[in-house]
Image: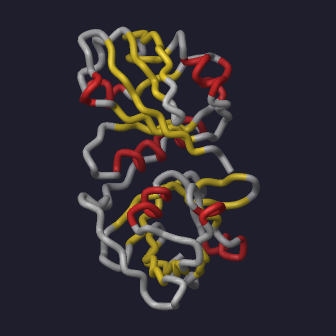
Amino acid sequence: MSDAPEFFKVFLEKQSTEHLRIPPAYHKHIRVSPPRVFHLSDPCGDTWNVALIRAEGGLYFAHGWPNFVKDHALENGDLLIFSCLDEFRFRVSIFDHTGCPKDFVRCPGAPKEVGNSKKRKGDDSASCHIVDMVGRSTSNQIPRFTITINKSHIHLHYLAIPMRFARMNNLLDKGAAVIRDPSGTEWPVVLRRQDHPSMLSMNKGWRDFSIANDLKVGDICVFELLMDKIEVDKFSLAVYINKLP
């Protein structure tokens, strides 16, 4: 993809805040199969990790993209020029409605690029793994994990918490959790610990949360641990949902 031309996008809040569609004419220059992590470098040289996904016949920058939008205070009419640096990296030049380079304030702890992640076999696990890496790459120190919803989350009525996340945050001995959805509604869930294979999962209560929030296969959920709500026997998670386009 090193000889690929640049492409540009005009930022439109209603269409581009949660995800950004790659121009169809540019697809032929992308030689990797999604889901895949790409790295976007801004004019200051800082790097944001975003997930490239396929949806409705198109290619989109999805999870990780809203962070880029927020950190650069993108507005209607801003012009973004994406210049290919290598197979997985773009430099993004940003211009405001006047046609001049956009001034923006660097947010404290701007995300930096992290190491590459190996893709696991299987579509569902690969999607979960790739997007989970993107979620962890934002460097504001809030413990989080990211899951791409698959059929088992919908039909089997459970969701497994990544074991690395559970171990690092001392959650394995908890028996319950509270999930706070984007509307602020809190959903109690029962946790189940399993040793073979090693797993900590949300069971009773997850189905109610899933139905109430109309989760579909392909939706991306970001779970953030609320550090001030960790108790002896339970903990709380705030959930942000990125609906599949």
Which residue is nearer to you in this view: 119 or 232? Answer: 232
Residue at x 64%, y 64% (from the top left corner):
21
Residue at x 36%, y 38% (from the top left corner):
144
Q: State the image coordinates of residue 23 (x, y, percent, origin top left).
A: 68, 72
Which residue is nearer to you in this view: 110 or 128? Answer: 110
**Horizontally, is 103 left or right of 210 in the view?**
left
**Horizontally, is 132 left or right of 24 in the view?**
left
Identify whether 79 is placed above or below 136: below
Residue at x 30%, y 77% (from the top left corner):
44
Which residue is nearer to you in this view: 195 or 244? Answer: 244
Among all residues in the image, which is located at the extreme front? 184
| The quadrant where residue 71 appears | bottom left
Identify whether 226 is placed above or below 137: above
**Horizontally, is 64 left or right of 219 in the view?**
left
Q: State the image coordinates of residue 177 (x, y, percent, origin top left).
A: 40, 17
Q: State the image coordinates of residue 80 (x, y, percent, origin top left).
A: 53, 78
| The quadrant where residue 233 appears | top left
Residue at x 75%, y 57% (from the top left corner):
57
**Horizontally, is 27 left or right of 67 in the view?**
right
Among all residues in the image, which is located at the extreme bottom? 99
Q: State the image coordinates of residue 45 (x, y, percent, origin top left).
A: 31, 75
Among all residues in the image, which is located at the extreme right? 57
